[in-house]
Amino acid sequence: MHLSQFELTYVPQKAVKGQALVDFLDDHPPMENVMVQAMKPWTMFFDGSSRRELAGAGIVINSPSSVVTNIVITFSTQYTNNRAEFEALVIGLWTQKDMGVTRVKVLGDLQWMIAKVNKEYKGISLLVMTFSSIVQEFINAFEYIQVSQIPREENRKDAFFGIISSAA
């Protein structure tokens, strides 16, 4: 094709498309931090509490982009403190699965329960065995899950869990 007004001649170059892509990627490297954030797990804190007439649970879920979801539950029947803890864990895991979360880091302060979830402790009570099997089903459903015990005083949302204690 001849562009007569400017005396230019158009010559198509097949390699330009590939070179343009190489030049673009050179000028705009992939955003590695986006992939890192997508791979970061969600974080869940949980706690349960029981008093004479009332029991409750608190769950705090932090997304990788720092969006915080607080869940406070008051149970309509009396539970032991251990059952309230297990209920908080199960409800928190169920909520995250329902939200489509695939990677999660779970933090709680009841040492023996975390050891049981991580199969480091063998409980013999019916309650422990029942809840352990439910929790294991959830654990198997996540792509990545880490369950860790943290001291109560280091629990990031300890003030929030104080609401549970006062409500329960």
Image: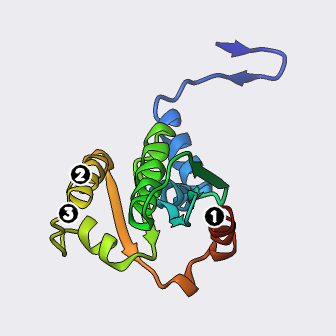
Q: Please state which of residues 36 and 124 is positioned toward the viewer in this rendering.
A: 124
In the displayed structure, would residue 76 be above or below residue 115?
Answer: above
Q: Secondary structure at mark 3?
A: loop
From the image, tell me which residue sits under label 3.
125
In the displayed structure, would residue 148 be above or below residue 39?
Answer: below
Residue depth check, mark 3 versus mark 1: number of the one nearer the observer: 3
Residue at 24% x, 53% y: name it.
136
Distance (Cα) linking label 3 and label 2: 9 Å
Give the mark nearer the N terminus: 3 vs 1: 3
| Residue positioned most to the right | 5
Amino acid, disc 2 = Thr
Which disc is residue 116 wearing? none
In the displayed structure image, the side of residue 33 where residue 105 appears, left or right: left
Distance (Cα) linking label 3 and label 1: 25 Å
From the image, tell me which residue sits under label 2.
130
In the displayed structure, would residue 48 be above or below residue 10?
Answer: below
In the displayed structure, would residue 106 be above or below residue 110?
Answer: above
Task: Give percent across and percent down for residue 73.
Answer: 60, 51
Amino acid, disc 1 = Ile
Q: Report crowding for label 2: few under 14, some 14 to 19, many 20 or more residues within 10 A (C-alpha).
A: few
Give the mark nearer the N terminus: 2 vs 1: 2
Residues under numbered marks 3 and 1 in contact, where contact means CB atoms less than 8 Å apart: no
Task: Give percent across and percent down for residue 110.
Answer: 40, 75
Residue at 58% x, 56% y: name it.
63
Residue at 45% x, 57% y: name it.
79
Which disc is residue 164 wearing? 1
Q: Quadrant of the N terminus?
A: top right
Give the mark nearer the N terminus: 3 vs 2: 3
Residues under numbered marks 3 and 2 in contact, where contact means CB atoms less than 8 Å apart: no
Task: Give percent across and percent down for residue 161.
Answer: 63, 69
Task: Give percent across and percent down for residue 168.
Answer: 61, 62
